[in-house]
Amino acid sequence: MNEKKAKLIYKHNSFDIIEEGDYVLCAISGKKVMLKDLNYWNVDLQEAYYSAKEANERFKDLKK
């Protein structure tokens, strides 16, 4: 199966799909995040995170 990277616009409680695809990449780890599993993102930075761990890492980096 050929998986395709999606392009999204992240909103506060949802996201819009700009280009259809199956996954996005985590901004911290580079891991694939399937759209059905996407739960963590940053609206201001417009980036996705694999899990709460990566989202927390970014949050800590921004507070420095």
Image: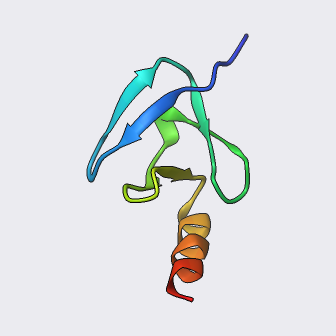
Quarter in which the N terminus is drawn? top right
State the image coordinates of residue 7 (x, y, percent, origin top left).
50, 29
State whether residue 8 is above or below residue 3: below
Could you tell whether 63 is left or right of 57 in the image?
A: left
Percent x, y of residue 22: 57, 23
Q: Where is residue 16, by image quadrant? A: top left
Which quarter shows the C terminus? bottom right
How many numbered circles are shown? 0
Q: Is residue 57 above or below residue 10?
A: below
For image coordinates 48% across by 17% down, the residue present is 20
**Is residue 23 found left or right of 9 in the rendered image?**
right
- Whether 4 is drawn above or below 31: the answer is above
Q: Decide which of 39, 25 is in the foreground and name it.
A: 25
Q: Position of residue 51 (x, y in %)?
A: 57, 59
* Residue at the spot 61% in from the left edge and 74% down from the top edge: 57
Percent across and percent down for residue 24 are 59, 36
Tell me what residue is drawn at x 56 percent, y 82 percent.
Answer: 60
State the colouring used for the structure image.
Answer: rainbow
Residue sticking out furthest to the top: 1
Please tell me whether residue 56 is drawn above or below residue 28 in the rendered image: below
Q: Which residue, as the protein is rendered here, is positioned at the far left?
A: 13
Identity of the residue drawn at 27% across and 53% down: 12
